[in-house]
Image (tube, helix red, strand yellow):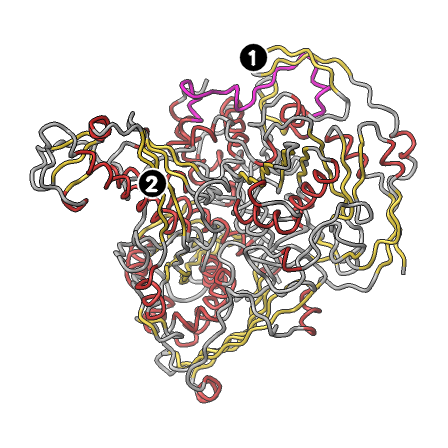
Amino acid sequence: MDTVMKVGIGTPLSRVDGLEKVTGRAKYAAEYEVPDMLHGVAVPSAIARGRIAAIDDRAARQVPGVVEVLTHENRPREAWLDRSWKDELKIPGEPFRALGDDRVLFAGQPVALVLAESFEAARHAASLLDIRYEEEAHNIDFQVSLAEKFEPSKKRSSFHPPKNRGDAEAAFAEAPLKLEGEYHLATEHHNPMEMHATTLHWHGDGKITVYDKTQGPQGVQAYLASAFGFSKSDVRVVNAYVGGAFGSGLRPQWQVQLATLAAKHMQRSVRVVMTRQQMFTHVHRPECRMSVRLGADVEGRLTSVICDATTSTSRFEDNMEDIVIWGMMNYASPNAAGSYSIAPRDTYTSADMRAPGAATGMTLFEIAMDEMAYKAGVDPLEFRLLNYSEVDAMNGTPFTSKALREAYREGAARFGWDRRSPEPRSMREGRELVGWGVATGMWDAMFSKTSASAKLSANGHLEVACATSDIGTGTYTVLTLVAADTLGLPPEQITARLGDSSLPTAPVEGGSWAAASSGAAVQLACQSVAKKLLRAADKVEGRPLNGAHSLDDVVFEGGRMLLKSDPTRSVGIVQAMQAAELPVIEEEETASGGISGMVSQMLKSRNTHSAIFCEVRVDEELGQVRVTRIVNAVAAGRIINPKTARSQILGGVVMGMGMALHEETLADRKLGRWMNHNLAEYHVPAHADVEQIDVIFVDEPDPEVTPLGVKGVGEIGIIGTAAAIANAIFHATGKRIRSLPITIDKLID
Amino acid sequence: MTHHTSPKAGTAHASAAPMASMGASLTINGTPHQLLIEPWTTLLDLLREQLGLTGTKKGCDHGQCGACTVLLDGRRINSCLKLAVSLDGSEVTTVEGLGQAGRLHPLQAAFIEHDAFQCGYCTPGQICSAAGLIAEGHARSREEVREQMSGNLCRCGAYTNIADAVLEVLEKGDAR
């Protein structure tokens, strides 16, 4: 057998799209050149709630180059029914329609679109609109909105209601150790580096190509067809490169609505790019208040877990997240209860941002867990092990796998947790207090029905294709590795195509399901190609593979098929295709959970887990916090590409640092606007904030969870990270801050 | 209650006058360009919208994120904060000019090797900024690299990998 290193699942491979990205050739939504294109600049509403009384666009129209000012008064007709405007998230309510009517629902809402031959003319003219409003009372303050909190009768389909067990109230009342606390997370905005943009190519024959910043090209295709009256086959949506999204591209955002309205109205190509300020006028992570009550016996064993949470939504849609269930699932308390409500305010609808629900609920719960550990006088890591649950404690189901114990152990060893001094404020270096904290992360391992194609040409080049998206997640590279693994081809001979609605069907990219789902589909498609190759090998003179009846009898390696029983007998892939006179083999397959998968899904829980260890240094006088060291040990099943998977975790951890210390969209109550709607005042971690991050993937073989044994890594990195930091800050300073982010003002009283 | 948002007072009339273009010569990625530029056009928009050089990214248009970093006469700047007409006689290097397939700049190669990006949108700015940083010669340590790269935000959080990539090139001393 030759000794060529097989590149496949598990090989750390540099991004196959890396060259395009470092040379500036990768094209994002606003960068496609289309002929005869107009630039559209949206005009934001100056009020938070009310009606547009009059728009005077005369000055704007006088600007040379301006060709039209689109408003609710002259926009083209669109679908009437709300259901025509539903997207893949299917949030109950009335989906927002840009320029739909004269109502203003939130500050910064686009109320007009200025269309001009140049960007500069459109931008200038947009500042000249004279708009009169009838303003109504409004509120965007979450604390105020809590007075209106409610539990919607129509729930978001992705919502998992808490399942109570035992008698949590009675157990809490009787518990010798009690903790009661109210925890808070600020409103956060996704702020991917690329602003939402759409370049719509109007072909003039009824067809449009839409270069859109989205996580789901087929979702946008279906949405545009349904809301704007196109035939689906006339709409092609392309998102080959997406400059980050973190959930902001799950729903079609208003720029694609405006671009489509404008193109229909003008019968011309149009580009609409949001400004950074406008990036604060759509989706955001809901603000959250969660009260946690924990009861424990004198040794620290939890006897009661009670979580009650409220998150923010808009007045026109009821967004819900899984906030309260994480602690109820993760810890072995015999009694647990949860309740959840939402509170409306006059903003755009909140929705999914990286690890929606868990990033909030698990994080806040893990701060409470830390408090309880101190109350019980048990080391915070020991406390978690003491309450470890081998099964999903809320649903009563076993996990397909749960290597959290290993994650705790390996993370603690790497971090040096055993050298921790237990008392708060007991570690110091110079003017800085040093603190060590730990927290747990938990996320779902999901799988979505996905199709993919594989096309092998007689020159040995393979193209795999799927309509999923790579938003920086490494999907191009992951699919290349799966294909290389299945057909034994070097990555250089493989092209992965995705980010195009014309490719085989895939759901919107999100929830950390893309690698598991599109990976399985690519594997199936490649296996179908492999079967055809095996048959083609029969035509090779001398039939070297005689005796191979199925794929189990051969291995694919180095561009050849080798007989397992006698690897000296082999046939080249190109050789087989030539012998069988096949210029090309093309197969499409669909990966779905299947009947056994569905049964298993009901009987078992599927989750990723993580253990995060953190060191902070806090300047005692200035209250400045430095996160000097983080170890994140992740149990996420099989890792397809350790190189890009590690980066996913790093990115989650960095965003978790933002959640812990920086990110907070602040409400101006009087004006009903976000005050800090820019990157100078909405702080995200910068180079200077990020020191040392170690990522460990613990061994967690799990053939049951998904076809490839993959659980996904896009979200687990952020979950719990902010809690580990908050807990380390307590350990350093003795100050327990229950409201994130922990800004300096909260630390220096 | 009625609320009236008035446009910039008194500007409406004047604004109707056409923007007279002005001539400027710029050398971009080694190629001289004789350009007619409207005075309100930034270097960033000139590159992206008129010259097809979309490697330089717009992330905020306010000099707050660094995605539009290019080298102006060898120094790193935010191209969104420069009016293009003011740059007559200047030399601009964008990511496209730093290197291309087959002749990558050492920073470009190091970014791929260290997985120093995910979505890739801040990447051209990070790379141009790092080239500027190395040319400045002030950064020696990892801490200094981190501090002096802090004008370039990366929302994907590739910071540790970016620092690894920049340090590798800095230490090898082979940045052109």
**Image quadrant in which the N terminus of chain A is located:** top left
- Rendered residue at 42%/38% (across/down): B161
Q: What residue did someone put label 1 on?
A: B30
Q: Quadrant of residue A545?
A: top left
Q: Position of residue B136 (x, y in %)?
A: 53, 23
**Image quadrant in which the C terminus of chain A is located:** bottom right
Q: Assign a secondary structure to mark 2.
A: strand
Q: Assign a secondary structure to mark 1.
A: loop
Is residue A174 shown above or below A293? Answer: below
Is residue A563 shown above or below B94? Answer: below
In the image shown, does A356 or A554 lie closer to the viewer?
A554
In the image shown, does A606 or A221 lie closer to the viewer?
A221
Q: Is residue A275 visible?
A: no
The amino acid type of the residue labelled 1 equals: Gly
Q: Which mark is residue A642?
A: none
Question: Which chain contains the residue that carries disc 1?
Answer: B
Question: Which chain contains the residue that carries disc 2?
Answer: A
- Rendered residue at 41%/35% (across/down): B164
Q: What residue did someone put label 2 on?
A: A587
In the image shown, does A112 or A418 lie closer to the viewer?
A112
In the image, the segment drawn in magenta is B81-108
